[in-house]
Amino acid sequence: MYSEKVMDHFKNPRNVGEIENASGVGTVGNAKCGDIMRIFLDIDDDGIIQDVKFKTFGCGAAVATSSMATELVKGKTVQEALQVTNKAVMEALDGLPPVKVHCSLLAEEAIHAALWDYAEKNGLTIEGLEKPKDDISEEEEEEDY
Amino acid sequence: MKKMIYLDNAATTRTAPEVVEAMLPYFSEFYGNASTVYEFGGKSKEAISKAREIIAGGIGARENEIYFTAGGSESDNWALKAAAEAYKSKGKHIITSKIEHHAILHTCQWLEQNGYEVTYLDVDEFGVVKLDELKKAIRTDTILISIMFANNEIGTIEPVAEIGTIAREHGVLFHTDAVQAFGQVPINVDELNIDMLSSSGHKLNGPKGIGFLYIRKGVKIRSFLHGGAQERKRRAGTENVPGIVGFGKAVEMALATMKERTDKERQLRDYLMERVLKEIPFTRVNGDRTNRLPNNVNLCFQFVEGESLLIMLDMKGICGSSGSACTSGSLDPSHVLLAIGLPHEIAHGSLRLTLGSDTTREDLDYTVDAMKEIISQLREMSPLYEDYMKKNR
């Protein structure tokens, strides 16, 4: 069901944990749908992401996309991190099953939410960053039978 | 192959070697069509009769009340759709429960789209259908009550005798999906006032692709598959002779070993539940502690998601199942766990382990040890656990 890369990131997730006094923290998803992601960013004075950690409650794909998303933004500038889309996360994982695409959206959203929190705390405006939605995972179609 | 501990016997079971052996001659030795005149075809016919006799005996029915099908889902579809059609002049109201298998629920939804009205009864916190609600739900146009014998997820055994009595008193047909129960608990259709009963071969160490529907003599029911005269013209199609023979053998074995096998499973089941509850915090047992199928354990681990848990158990060679959304292919967790009143986030962390006749205490010890490690690992990663621990520090 999952690619080898997804399984690798699920079995050995990168950057699990939390950052005390993080520059920005974002939590997205909801327990109702079974996925919650929380991303912690440590951003230095030059706007570079020095460290990133995550915690996720969710399925294999949710854990793997969180892990990959943290890898993709680590060491990047805020602007570069903003360009990390769910597509990029999926490609880096060699794809996801169709029913799990929302997990990659969640990962993108979690990064954005953490960046938003960072911007708010520091009174900054990050170009191209919109206020994260409260819940992004209710958009799937009902199956017909 | 790596070490495997198979604890998903409610999904399917291993076909018993004796069953396979009984089936084999009916592939390439006695392959005749049972509907033919010559003696060779008669061999197949005889084998079908023998299996039918065993199965009928197993539920206290007569042989001409057993109709072979391709499995539990077909039996459920047939019972509901055909009874709905045959009794529509009396009424178009059907009563079922919220915790039925999808073979029943989705068939009911289809019937609703076709002019029938369905009442879905609530269950209590253990998954038991509320009898007073059942009585209240019966109307003059109610034609059928369909309540499962035992639930496939949480193992709860329904008050089938009481339901049968209520149905009989009101002159309403009673169908029960006994796919999980047959071979695990004694069933007598006359004592329990059951009019129709669905069963499946592969849940009791028989082959896949074979099942039966019991239809009490006198119940009006339409053909399901039209064609030849097989199954008293009710279910056309050349009989699956090896499947039927294997099913018969599996039922014979299940009935002969029931007492001893289920006593042992019950002990192991209780041992597994006790160890887990004692050794893993924030855990609950779903369903009733004792009024449940002898081989069923269903647990919820707070702050943990079911699919992750299953993948990690699989890495240790343990096969289980979960009612989380991710494993159901939708966004909602199991309808059964929601019906017994669990909040979504807890229902997502469910794990069902169903034992088999060859499950050992060592298997379960290995499984609990693995679970302890995996669950604490997943909780370390869970933002829900982090929030809870911070709040309750």
Image (cartoon, rainbow, N blue to C red):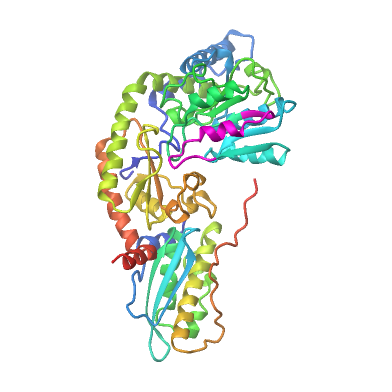
B95 versus B347 height, above or below: above
Work out whether residue B24 can be spotted. Answer: no
**Residue B202 image point, x, y percent:** 47, 30
Q: In the depicted view, which residue is nearer to us: A118 or A82?
A: A118
- Range of the magenta residues? B122-144
A79 versus B337 height, above or below: below
Residue at the spot 43% in from the left edge and 60% down from the top edge: A58
* B123 magenta-colored: yes
Q: In the depicted view, which residue is nearer to us: B182 or B205?
A: B182
The answer to whether B58 appears left or right of B44 in the picture is: left
The answer to whether B241 appears left or right of B18 in the picture is: right
Residue at the spot 68% in from the left edge and 40% down from the top edge: B112
Q: Quadrant of residue B118?
A: top right
The answer to whether A94 appears left or right of A44 in the picture is: right
**Residue B237 image point, x, y percent:** 64, 24
Q: In the depicted view, which residue is nearer to us: A73 or B111?
A: B111
Q: In the depicted view, which residue is nearer to us: A11 or A119?
A: A119
The answer to whether B386 appears left or right of A6 in the picture is: left
